[in-house]
Image (tube, rainbow, N blue to C red):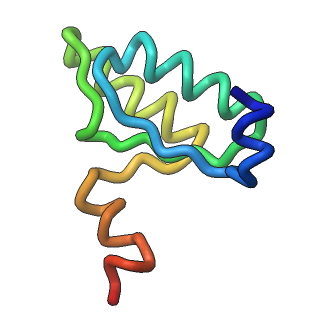
Amino acid sequence: MHQILAAGGIDHLVLAGIATGGVVLSTACLVADLDYRLTVLSDGCADPDPALHRLLVEKVFARRGDVPSVDEWVKSLPTAQG
């Protein structure tokens, strides 16, 4: 994965998905460890355990990158301002 992203000049990943405590968490940790800029869409993720989702979004992901809502992220895009 790293070689493909690096070859494409990609340095920032935006994550969303189900299983906040599974795939989203493991992917966020991997890309943060590889020094990519990280954005996790707070309401673009879900987990069967709402308390775990909240902990990850508010504490863990927030320490590794940006954690906006989908609407906040869309409004921050250059094409959305214009």
Q: Residue at x 34, y 84 (%)?
A: 81
Q: State the residue in front, 62 or 37.
A: 37
Tell me: 48 left or right of 63: left
Q: State the residue in front, 74 or 42.
A: 74
Residue 54, position in %: x, y?
29, 27
Give the farthest residue toward the bottom: 82
Tell me: 51 left or right of 12: left
| Rendered position, 70 above or below 60 | below
Q: Residue at x 43, y 41 (%)?
A: 40
- Indicate the quadrant containing the C terminus: top left, top right, bottom left or bottom right: bottom left
Residue 52, position in %: x, y?
32, 15
Q: State the residue in front, 1 or 51.
A: 1
Q: Residue at x 20, y 18 (%)?
A: 50
Tell me: 30 left or right of 81: right
Q: Residue at x 44, y 37 (%)?
A: 15
Instruction: Tell how many labels.
Output: 0
Q: Image quadrant of residue 71? A: bottom left
| Rendered position, 20 above or below 10 | above
Residue 7, position in %: x, y?
79, 45
- Indicate the quadrant containing the N terminus: top left, top right, bottom left or bottom right: top right
